[in-house]
Amino acid sequence: MLDYDQSMLDYLGIKDFEGLFSDISPKIRKKKLNLDSHRPEYKLVQEATSLSESNRFDDYSNFLGCGVYDRIIPSSVDSIVSRSEFLTSYTPYQAEISQGMLQSLFEYQSIISDLLGMDASNSSMYDGPTALGEAARMAVRVNDRKTILIPDNIYRNKRNILINYCSGLDIRFKEYSFDMKTGMLDLGDLESKIDEDVSAVIVENPNSYGIVDENVLKVKDHIKDSLLISYVDPISLGALKPPGDYGSDIAVAEGQQLGIHQNYGGPYLGIFTYRKELARKSPGRLIGETTDTTGRRGYVMTLQTREQHIRREKATSNICTNQALMGVAALAYLATVGPSGLRRIALATMHHSVKLKQIVSDNRKIRVNVFSGTSFSDIPVIIESEEERLHRLLRDNKIFGGIKLDRIMENRYDKLKNAFFFSTTEKTEDSDLLKLKHALEAV
Amino acid sequence: MSFRQARYDEPFIKDLQSRTTFETISEDYDDSIVPSSMLNRAPKIPEIAEFDVVRHFTRLSQMNYSVDTGFYPLGSCTMKFNPKYADKIASMPFFSEIHPLRPEWSVQGTLQVMFELQEYLKEISDMDEVSLQPLAGAQGELTGVLIIRKYFELKKELSTRREIVVPDSAHGTNPASAAMGGFNVVEIPSNDKGTVDLDALRYAVTDKTAAFMITNPNTLGIFDPNIVEIAEIVHSKGALLYYDGANLNAILGITSPGLMGFDVVHFNLHKTFATPHGGGGPGAAPVAVNKKLADLLPGPIVRKGNNGYYLDRSNSKLGNIASFYGSFGVLLRAWSYIKRNGSDGLKMNSYRAVLNANYLAKKISKDVRISHPGLKKHEIVASSEESGKRALDIAKYIIDAGLHAPTIYFPLIVKEALMIEPTETVTKKDLDDFAELIHKAVSSTQEELSTHPVNTASGRLDEVKATRELVLKR
């Protein structure tokens, strides 16, 4: 007991701590909480250090990607999001005392909308795939139609999230196919599936084959008045046209690559942008600019009447807690690398993809130029090998990579039966590529 | 305490005038490899020197109140101190730099943390199985609702069980999650004690009911003494009982959702388990269920086998609700908190959280009416209605003195509500100071009250203008 615990109990006229729980029937009282007893901080840190060390494989070359990437994170990003004024604050319900977070999130909305070429952005969602789920729901709210067209190669986890997020709506998902020569979406097939019941078409760029999909530029002309939802890689926008340029009504992205650590799967950042006139149908917290009583500029959460705490079952989404801190990380990242840095990072990634293909191209046992389209980061490589055998080989050569294509998506094409993904980033080095070349020679 | 928050005329980020200094990649790659139709020559983001970026955000941070700044009694948010050892552990590179698709043999330390956290949460909740995947409280609720939906779909009862019942005191996320999962929401009124009206419940729960969602203690801070009977009523109609874990901090180690008879539970790790809330997120909300629902949980579950820890993907009925295995960075902090505190520490935290709430209730009861008097758990709801003062004005008075205000205007069933949750990480002096502030606020004239705040980074802000003009970017 602390010295004042007893005096506080006395003030209440309650004998001891247990007396505070006399309203809980003995029938449902917990007999004993069976965890270890407390341990000193230094012991805990020792234990955690030793567990983390067991994950240590820093002499491995990394070719993992497929939506999450090991990118350069400027130290300033970690420094900024470690500031406890940001880290340990709650949602800015009291605006006047929370201007720092509110201005940061307003700036996030501004920079992210610009990066994606869209009118407006919310202040963050959980991650890319859940943002996509919310985008599909929003499209149905906008035009009240019942079909969503999706790429047939969409990652399985995204497909599941879409289905789960929309399970309360009476809607169908239909798939469109891909051109197996270019690796780009098949515009003819897509167009043939458009009818007055299609609420929205989801496209990805780069697509799930890692191909810079030039056909997304033409999609808007082939889908009548269905909405266009684009899922993009934000790093790629350093070199590729943003989704606003090809007529996207809603554009979403996974923001992990913008200065957020891989963290074995989270926390990440769901980027969610749209045309401004759709704002009132949109999910998530929005920060708006206003003025205070003296006319000074300031920021508040706005359009809250869309949200669960006010609208309850009629809210546009149930989302409450979001990923505000990750939004600040992405903002700090973009501000630090700047337009020239982002362009270099995107181009370096693409150049490393070209290099990877070149360096292993003389290996006759594998096929690396699967599609004629340009790879951004994820490269499918056809390797006639059992998955387990390949992975053993990679492990022996200290390489992470080689995610089997049908592990992450439903594969509809014979050609891709033995495809494995190897991904590059701006950090990929020649020595990594040579190691990979050497390893694959033993296939 | 005299308080003055930093007040900079901090420029909008695009108006900072400097040049990018980032040079990690010096090579200028040519852009001829980009298909020309797709080429973007200049991404539209600002040019700023790294040192200016850091200064900008440092100044902004100084205009932001936080748990590390002081008392933060937001009701239902459990803004307790976020221990620094958890930050330290979460930033260890061989935890934070791990790609989610790395092979299991190379992430045994990470999987052990997840496995242990699963075990801890099962012990704390007395539930049978847990998924760490859901990313925040509302997503935990949606997960729970979808588990319930799948359960009835498999039983071929979904076509009739179209309703989810919630009390009128419920968090807004409860009805929103139920609706998102495709259920009709039936709201029942609370009784004059602020708890579930059993007659209303008996009337509302029928063979059309899929579930009843509640939090216990509820948003009024009251532990519902009829919880066992509530569970019986719900189960007798074949419906399921959902536990909103937002208020778990009140009862950890004392009772549990499992003992109370719940079927589905979500935990808010960013509340009860002290992970930092980051100005709005990230959170993490593992979901636990009892045996009959165990194979409906989403995502892989971590198991311990002969060759170490592995991801069991045999639960495929619901698929996944998020991409990977949950917000590991948050899970790791919660694991650290549980390990550091242990059984004894966790229970003591609940004792103190409840003691502080009850102490504060008595202290302020002379100035504001406590809604539904009696023993409280983790939080209290006061109404300023009888003092003639608006909750909003009291809140602004409090922040002007350098404390955070309570949650206001919630729960919706209390007029001019001030919802106060002190948590265990405050001193008696903090509580006395806060009570004194409430006293001063209600003793002030309305005219005086409406002048606040003046010591904060901004004066009172015009929310109506923000909605009307809707400036969402610049």
Image (cartoon, coloured by chain):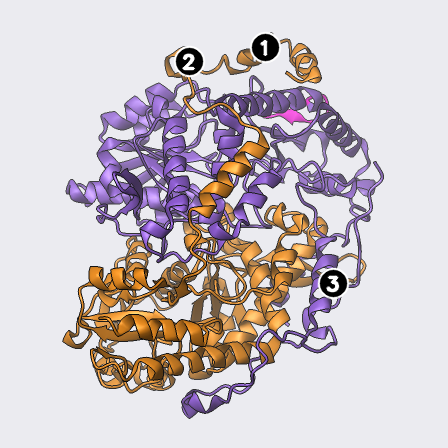
Chain colours: A orange, B purple
Res A399 → quadrant: bottom left
What residue does disc 2 label?
A25
Q: Nearer the viewer, residue A420 or B209?
A: A420
Q: Amino acid at mark 3?
A: Arg
To the question of a shared chain for discs 3 and 2, the answer is no
Foreground residue among A340 and B45: A340
C-alpha distance separating marks 3 and 2: 55 Å
Compared with A400, B34 (above or below) is: below
Residue highlighted by disc 3: B55
Q: Can residue B127 be seen from the camera position used here? A: yes
Cα distance in 3D space between marks 1 and 2: 17 Å
Q: CA distance from mark 1 to mark 3?
A: 50 Å
Q: Position of residue A406 (x, y in %)?
A: 22, 65
What range of the chain is rendered magenta? B365-371
Q: Residue at x 73, y 76 (%)?
A: B18
Q: Which mark is residue B36?
A: none
Is A334 one of the magenta-colored residues? no
Q: Amino acid at mark 1?
A: Asp
- The answer to whether dots 1 and 3 both sit on one chain is no
Quadrant assignment, res A405: bottom left
Q: Which of pointers 1 and 3 indicates the residue nearer the eye?
A: 3
Residue at x 35%, y 86% (from the top left corner): A218
Pick the front one: B235 or A65: A65
Q: Which residue corresponds to mark 1?
A: A16
In the depicted structure, whether residue B33 falls above or below residue A261: below
Q: Can you tell which of label 1 and label 2 is closer to the viewer?
A: 1
Main SS category, magenta section: loop
For label 1, the SS is loop
